[in-house]
Image (cartoon, rainbow, N blue to C red):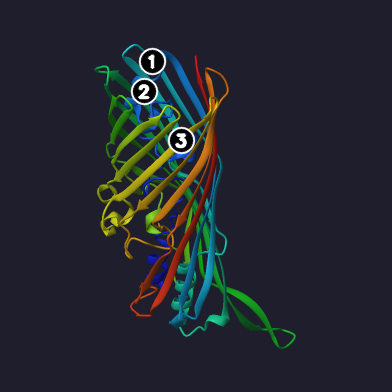
Amino acid sequence: MRKISLISFMMLIVSTSTFAGGLLTNTNQHAAFLRMLSRGATTEIDGALSNPAGLAFLPNDGFHMSLSIQSAFQTRNIDASCEGLGLNKYYEGKASAPVIPSLFAAYKMGDWTLSGFFGITGGGGKASFDDGLPMFDAMVIGGLGAQSIPSNAYSLKSYMDGKQYIYSVQLGLTYKVTDWLSAFAGGRMNYFTGGYQGALKASAAVDLPSPAGGTIPVGTELIGIDLDCDQTGWGFTPVIGLDAKLGKLNIGAKYEFKANLNIENSTKVNSLRMIGAAESELADYKHGVNTPNDIPSMLSVAAAYEFLPVLRASVEYHFFDDKSAGMAGGKQKHLTKGTNEYLAGIEWDVIKRLTVSFGGQITDYGLSNDYQSDTSFSCDSYTLGFGAKLKLSEKANLNVGYMWTTYEDYTKTSQDYINNGTKLSGTNVYSRTNKVFGLSIDYSF
């Protein structure tokens, strides 16, 4: 019993990314991304993040700024079945981030451009499983069943909430080396903050003798777990980039180095109680414990071409080296490869003041059964986005975009479902949905 409880609950972590991008990285920060997706060769203000070297080709000297607000809504569901445990249940998880701000800024003077960016580059919301997770039920059913307590003799109540945010501030300099070539160097400071709250109570009714005769039913706690843990950490990401503007063709490239990031527990409640045993704690969530949560290196290469004065298109490739980024429990070792993303977008100036656009993205992770878990799972996907840019004046633009992601279900079949040597086979089908809406105001002065 004790071994089962500790193994199951030492993984009370939920990944709550509500963005496009790699396993731990958010790439969509501006409504221009939502409406077109491929922005790695842009020379507009959103390039402060997606193509900072391209800011050398901003149309005018002076200040350029943009404020972007996004709203993201996601579901994370698990369809669990284990015949040997009598488990057949659908678990629904919801993650939302109603307001996600990002700020872009640049000051161009001749061949030099100073730029900055602020945004949530990882995580971005709160995920809630109001009915717990399959591992909760499996642990209790299997553990108490081993003590000859049938599943209909006790009740189980559980829930879990998780939230993660990585706030980032980036600063850097772009230099126009020649009339067609520019370079960027800078860095991004990342601050991680997260929190995990969970509770489980398994109880059984027992009959005690009544002074008046007969018996009185009492509920007795068999297993109890309570957790309230906050986590924080810092990490630095060096960033370099190049941009080549060759007539109607523009090529942008960016490399973000790995950020070594450890997160430290600040634990308020950490209690594991089991009938017949002394109260203890979940080891991974003890106060002061540090856990690796590196931000992986990322390569972006993109090309944009102007087919007509009113028609432009872009293609792009991303690689996230997730296998080299430290994760809790070393789970990055179970990935088969890093993440590959393929993006494309097109935009058309319908009239002088209105541009419409459309784009797509394919995300291919290196997933494996050993990497996937109830508390942290990913699914390969494709994403579509569309929207428009409205030219409000010579100095101001409004971008509006909508993006949705279609995920491929991941089926994980295990021959030892509760990992306790009983060799009961079971299957979890992991599925997700994601929808993001955003608008941005760009202004130059």
**Of 84 and 218, which appears nearest the observer?**
84
Q: Earlier in the sequence, mark 2 or mark 3?
A: 2
Determine the secondary structure under disc 2.
helix
Amino acid at circle 3: Glu
Return the x and y of residue 287 as percentages of the image width and height.
41, 49
Residue count near mark 1 (Cα–Cα under 10 Å), binned few <14, some 14–19, many ≥20: many
Q: In 3D space, how far apart are the residues under numbered discs 3 and 1 (Cα atoms)? A: 26 Å
| Looking at the image, residue 62 lies above or below residue 89 | above
User: Which residue is rendered at x = 35% and y = 30% of the image?
Assistant: 51
> Which quadrant, please, contains the N terminus?
bottom left
Q: Outermost residue toward the bottom?
A: 214
Residue matched to label 1: 108
Amino acid at circle 2: Leu
Residue matched to label 3: 347
The answer to whether mark 1 and mark 2 are in CB contact below 8 A is yes
**Of 75 and 445, which appears nearest the observer?**
445
Return the x and y of residue 200 as percentages of the image width and height.
53, 65
User: Which residue is rendered at x = 38% and y = 69% of the image?
Assistant: 412
**Front position among marks 2 and 3:** 3
Q: How many marks?
A: 3
Q: Earlier in the sequence, mark 3 or mark 1?
A: 1
User: Which residue is rendered at x = 47% and y = 78% of the image?
Assistant: 144
Q: Earlier in the sequence, mark 1 or mark 2?
A: 2
Q: Which mark is residue 55?
A: 2
Q: In 3D space, how far apart are the residues under numbered discs 2 and 3 (Cα atoms)? A: 20 Å
Return the x and y of residue 152 as percentages of the image width and height.
57, 82
Q: In 3D space, how far apart are the residues under numbered discs 1 and 2 (Cα atoms)? A: 8 Å
